[in-house]
Amino acid sequence: MVPVLFDLKPKDRIEELYDFRDELNKLLACYRDGRIALILGLRRMGKSSLLRSFLNSYNIPHILIDARRIILNEGGMSIRGFMNELSQSLTNFLQQRASFRDKLIGLLRNIDGISIGVQPLSISISWRRGRAVLTSLLEAVNRVAEDLNIKVVLAIDEVQELRALGLNIPMLLAYIYDNLGNIVAILTGSQVGMVYDTLRLNDPKSPLYGRAVVEVKLRRLSPDESLDFLRRGFEQYGVQVGDDVIREAASRLDGIIGWLTLFGWYYVHGNRDLNSIIDVAARQEIEELKSFLTKSRAENRYKVILRIVAEKPRRWSEIKRAVEMEEGVIVNDRNFTDLLRHLINMGILEKQGDAYKIADPVLEYGVRKYLR
Ligand SMILES: Nc1ncnc2c1ncn2[C@@H]1O[C@H](COP(=O)(O)OP(=O)(O)OP(=O)(O)O)[C@@H](O)[C@H]1O
Ligand SMILES: [Mg+2]
């Protein structure tokens, strides 16, 4: 058996996925009959894996924009980065689809702002004409898709990151929804509230309001599934692992498939100490958290909130009191609630009944140990 479950890269074939059948079926139904799907879930819950496996295994024609890759390549989100990513992705798509390529290239030649190189095929898109080039491009893709009687997926991984572009994303998607019937949008996001804000799904004035959006919410694995995932992964490597070890890892990693994968990978590669594995992961998470916090004027207040909540789930009033004690001032209720809401929107905190807790057990550990 080829070991795949503990492979660290996002999975890109259904055969490599652990379960997720219901989620795949939902995506397939949306591809056939719907217009927009959202894949939502905390960090490391497998959004990218689900998206990529779906697109590749069902052989779905697609243009994939990975917003994190843009940030990584460019050091931040920018129109130029977005256009490069789109050009690259479109080129890949056409390289794999000869019938589409021949028809589309004819149309693209007439669009001001798009230039095409042949051998090797390359398409570059310039932002000279602003948003118009984007709509012309999508119209052309839609026209060819209609001709060929197929549907093309426009996939955007971590869509909330595109907010920084100043493009009107809800408007663009509403345009696709209303006018480009052979394009289906599939978007993912780890900051669930930010996705809602980006798409303005709850805003009656938003162009997307009231349109049918299929939500695929990724979930934690149940305790039994976590055990099963780890057992199967170890079996693929032919590594014998004691039940107590597996049980402890399953319980501490709280069903988050990415952490279970990371644990399995380290374990079969020689690091057998759960604490040190969590420690490595936590440090990475904390670096990312800090880079978000340092950009905020409320940095210190956020830190106090996170540290108190990391001790154990806490109620609103308890957290507020801790902040007031720390700062020696009375804090305005509304401002304080906004901070909590923002942390929830970012997927960092989660509400359980009346109490707030840190959603990710690895981050929780990291906050306790490293957030100074
Ligand atoms: N269904 C699955 N079966 C097996 N492994 C999975 C599955 N889903 C995710 N993984 C593994 O979990 C890790 C995280 O997956 P992935 O990158 O897809 O998650 P994500 O939600 O996109 O994460 P991020 O929030 O960091 O973008 C990867 O190592 C991946 O291989
Ligand atoms: Mg991802």
Image: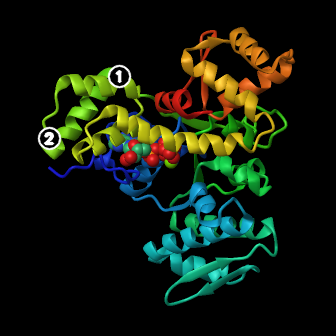
* x, y percent for residue 120: 49, 87
* x, y percent for residue 285: 53, 41
Q: Which mark is residue 239?
A: 2
| Gap between marks 1 and 2 measured at Cα | 20 Å
Label 2 lies in ligand 1 vicinity (Cβ under 8 Å): no
Residue at 79% across, 16% down: 324
Compared to residue 313, the image places residue 267 above or below, namely: below
Q: Which amino acid does label 1 sit on?
A: Ser
Please identify the quarter of the rendering in which residue 182 is found: bottom right
Please identify the quarter of the rendering in which residue 330 is found: top right
Q: What element carries label 2?
A: loop
Ligand 1 location (quadrant): top left
Compared to residue 67, the image places residue 244 above or below, namely: above
Label 1 lies in ligand 1 vicinity (Cβ under 8 Å): no
User: Tag 2 or tag 1, which sits nearer the N-term?
Assistant: 2
Please identify the quarter of the rendering in which residue 63 is found: bottom right
From the image, tell me which residue sits under label 1: 251
Which of these two is toward me, 55 or 362? Answer: 362
Q: Which amino acid does label 2 sit on?
A: Val
* x, y percent for residue 157: 56, 51
Q: For mark 2, does the 10 Å Cα neighbourhood hold few (<14), some (14 to 19), or many (20 or more) residues? A: few
Residue at 81% across, 38% down: 297
User: Residues at badges 1 and 2 in contact (C-beta under 8 Å)?
Assistant: no
Q: Is mark 1 on a helix, strand or loop?
A: helix
Left-right relation of 294 to 242 = right
Residue at 51% across, 33% down: 366
Residue 117 seen in the figure: yes
